[in-house]
Amino acid sequence: MDFNYTPEQQQFRDALRRFIDKDYTFEHRNKIVHSEKGVSDEAWATLAELGMTALPVPEEQGGFNGSAVDMMVVMQELGRGIVIEPYFATVLGVQFLKLAGGHDELLEQVAGGGLKLAAALGEKQSRHELFDIAATAKADSDGYVLNGTKTVVIHGAQADKIIVSARTSGGQRDTEGVSLFLVDGDAAGVTRKDYRTIDCQHAADITFANVRVPASALLGKAGAGWEILDAAADYGCALLCAEAVGAMDALNGATLEYLKTRQQFGVPIGKFQALQHRMAEMFMQAEQARSMATLAAVKVSSPDANERRRNVSAAKARVGQALKYVGQQAVQLHGGMGVTNELPAAHHFKRLTMIELTLGDTDHHLARFASLPGFRKAA
């Protein structure tokens, strides 16, 4: 198999890297972090101009119909530059719309950069089990009435529209009876509590109090939204794996440079063999994570749901192990400076920590992998 990027993928990567290196430097990022909004409209407009918002959108809606492998190229660069714009949240929302079908106008708006999305999936009791849903949606004559609270919605306060999972029937932990709705972020009854996460991105706790939505707000069929939710979450995991690889690459590069310049006993500490061994292991961990992230990007579109789940969970678990090792070693090798906000290394480590906890951590995906058919041989 050819693992080289196509010319088009290289062009996307190079264009995004030039933008980050020139206009989205670490210093500029810090200014955005501490701004009132916490994100940059100018940076978002540039991402749209570069075609990044159009990349995952089908050609019929003005996009480039990019595959998960195409998106992997972009997410690696965003991870390298620790970009804090609501790109991941929006493209995850795009996947929901694509899987549900029938939302051409919204996809066109996303492609042009005029619409930001978020996915409100988790609740305080659900942890990583996205089918554990207490929020309800009751049908009425005009549509549905939503009630409930969603927690840690990535860029939930920055989104124009929010994809919400709610229960129209069944028990709280049933996969049957799950429905998905598209809700305006400023709809009556929607309360969004915005806050900054440890990686300087934004999340929100969103309360829905008797929020009325029309029947057209339903994504897919009532009570049959789990398969869409599960597939879209796996797509999000594949993107996060790619972003983690980019962040680990940057972290390894910064650590190697530090070992070459920091001196102890009159020589660079990179000359100490013990530290060389640790640096070599960090490189190997990142390379193994890269291989698994590539596998996830290739298999996330598999028509076989169990094959998709198996490969995505294997990748998320292995990447989670790698990012923990690389992040912790980088902090130790930097010494006390490794946890200060003055260095990009600390921010990469924090972003990697959040990636580990998003859409299922290592333990969750190991358990999911082991629960799938074929893991254990029949007695």
Image: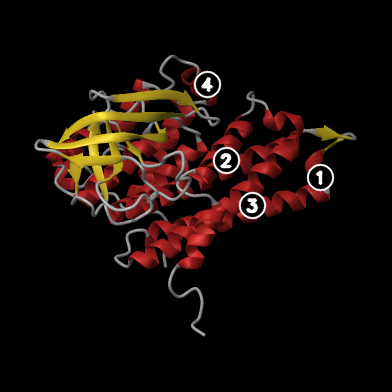
Image height of 117 relative to 285, above or below: above
The alpha-carbon separation of the residues under discs 3 and 4 comes to 28 Å
According to the image, label 4 marks what residue?
30
| x and y, in percent, of residue 328 in the image | 68, 43
| Residue under label 3 | 283
Residue contact at pointers 1 and 2, CB within 8 angstroms: no
Label 3 or label 1, whichever lies nearer to me, is: 3
Sequence-wise, the earlier of marks 4 and 2 is: 4
Q: Residues within 10 Å of mark 2 (few under 14, many from 20)?
A: some
Q: Nearer the viewer, mark 4 or mark 1?
A: 4
Tell me the kind of residue under disc 4: Asn
Instruction: Look at the image and tell me whether residue 69 can be seen.
Output: no
Residue with the mark numbered 2: 353
Vertical arrangement, residue 151 with respect to residue 221, above or below: above
Q: Mark 2 touching mark 3, by CB under 8 A? A: no
Q: Quadrant of the N terminus?
A: bottom left
The residue tagged with tag 3: helix, strand or loop?
helix
Chain-order first, disc 2 or disc 3? 3
Q: Residue 277 at x, y = what percent? A: 76, 53
Q: Nearer the viewer, residue 60 or 377?
A: 377
Q: CA distance from mark 2 to mark 3?
A: 18 Å
Type of residue at label 1? Lys
Q: Residue at x 70, y 37 (%)?
A: 331
